[in-house]
């Protein structure tokens, strides 16, 4: 289930800005729309490509930013 999390979105944006990076820059790098990148960051949609690039820019793993997206169930599926 996707979870909209505006507070986390704001924190990610702040961390990116501290590094001189914006979601617009990420969208241009990935050749994806800014709205797609924003929706992924907010939790409205999933995109491994976007999640990986945001995490790369922050020197962390996507699971550090969106742990609920990477939790595994008892059956071993994510």
Image: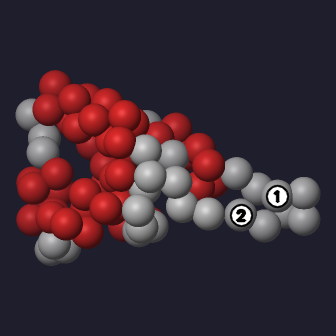
Give the left or right position of residue 65, taking residue 20 as reference. right
Q: Which part of the image, by quadrant, shows the C terminus?
A: bottom right
Can residue 38 be seen?
A: yes
Q: Residue 73 shows which numbered tag?
A: 1
Quadrant hosting residue 24: bottom left
- Numbered-mark total: 2
Q: Residues within 10 Å of mark 1 (few under 14, many from 20)?
A: few
Residue placed under numbered mark 2 in the picture: 78
Q: Are marks 2 and 1 in contact (CB under 8 Å)?
A: yes
Q: Which residue is at a point 85% across and 63% down the rendered structure image?
A: 76
Q: Position of residue 5 (x, y in %)?
A: 43, 44
> Is 10 in front, or is 20?
10
Name the secondary structure under disc 2.
loop
Whether 29 is drawn above or below 64: the answer is: below
Q: Which part of the image, by quadrant, shows the N terminus?
A: bottom right
How is the structure coloured here?
A: secondary structure
Q: Position of residue 49 (x, y in %)?
A: 37, 67
Quadrant hosting residue 60: top left
Q: What residue occupies the far right of the structure in this picture?
A: 74
Q: Which residue is at a point 52% across and 38% down the rendered structure image?
A: 64
Q: Position of residue 71 (x, y in %)?
A: 70, 51
> Is 37 in front, or is 58?
37
Q: Residues within 10 Å of mark 2 (few under 14, many from 20)?
A: few
Whether 70 is drawn above or below 11: the answer is: below
Give the left or right position of residue 41, taking residue 22 as reference. right
Q: Which residue is at a point 22% across and 29% down the rendered structure image?
A: 14
Q: Position of residue 17 (x, y in %)?
A: 14, 32
């Amino acid at each position: 289930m996707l979870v909209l999390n505006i507070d986390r979105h704001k924190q990610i944006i702040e961390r990116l800005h501290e590094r001189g990076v914006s979601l617009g820059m990420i969208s241009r790098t990935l050749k994806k729309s800014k709205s797609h990148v924003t929706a992924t960051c907010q939790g409205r949609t999933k995109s491994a490509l976007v999640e990986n690039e945001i995490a790369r820019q922050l020197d962390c793993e996507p699971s550090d930013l969106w742990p609920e997206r990477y939790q595994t169930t008892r059956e071993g599926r994510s």
